Amino acid sequence: MMMCSETPNQKNSLFNAMNRFIGAVNNMDQTVMVPSMLRDVPLDEDRELSSMKSDLDEGDMYSYYELLKSIRTNIEWGVRCAAADERRKESMKFTRVHSSASISSSASSSSSEEEDEEGEDLEKQFQFHLTGLQGVLGKLTLQANSLTKRYKQEIGIGGWGQ
């Protein structure tokens, strides 16, 4: 298969960001032969990985290894049914509140103005979320690469394969 070089516009596409992340996680998964070695290895020594640390997480490399793999699976196969059901419930609550608010506002405005605002609003929302998703995927890609590098250092093959 012939690979096309990326143009500057393609480099910033969501599809390419997802592919870079999936490639980094696949590389991490192939490199980390014994994931249990990552247990109890703190993130504090690695600046890039420690930025992922939150109050809820254990904060070891193994938990982030599993997190990155889980995100890859969600990208490749879709979000699991439980999460989709939860979002549907939240969406229904939001729709009820939003629809009652729009009913009261539609009495005072014409439908064409409302459609224009809604279309513009959807485009802004899409751009906002697309930008956010690309930023998150970029950070996750860096963190997968950093975890791979750190694992190599932990097992003593720091300069191997770079």
Image: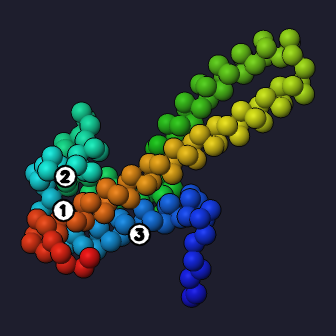
User: Which sits in the foreground, 63 or 46?
Assistant: 46
Circles 2 and 1, Cβ within 8 Å, touching? The answer is: yes
Locate residue 4: give its quadrant: bottom right
Q: Is residue 130 left or right of residue 106?
A: left
Q: Residue furthest bottom?
A: 1
Locate residue 109: give its quadrant: top right
Q: Of callouts 1 and 3, which one flags the residue occurring earlier in the amino acid sequence?
A: 3
Residue 73: image location, x then y, percent: 42, 60
Q: Of callouts 2 and 3, which one flags the residue occurring earlier in the amino acid sequence?
A: 3
Badge 2 element = loop
Label 1 crowd bin: few (<14), some (14–19), many (20+), radius 10 Å: many
Q: Which residue is mark 3?
A: 23
Label 2 crowd bin: few (<14), some (14–19), many (20+), radius 10 Å: few
Q: Of callouts 2 and 1, which one flags the residue occurring earlier in the amino acid sequence?
A: 2
Q: The disc labelled 1 sits on which kind of residue?
A: Arg
In the picture shown, does residue 109 fall above or below 156?
above
Q: Residue at x 9, y 72 (%)?
A: 156
Residue 143: image location, x then y, percent: 31, 56
Label 3 crowd bin: few (<14), some (14–19), many (20+), radius 10 Å: some
Q: Is residue 37 left or right of residue 4?
A: left
Q: The disc labelled 3 sits on which kind of residue?
A: Gly
Badge 1 element = helix
Q: Residue at x 23, y 46 (%)?
A: 50
Report the Cα–Cα distance between label 1 and label 3: 17 Å
Report the mark closest to the observer, 2 or 3. Answer: 2
Residue 8: image location, x then y, percent: 59, 65
Q: The disc labelled 2 sits on which kind of residue?
A: Asp
Q: Which residue is mark 2?
A: 46
Residue 69: image location, x then y, percent: 34, 59
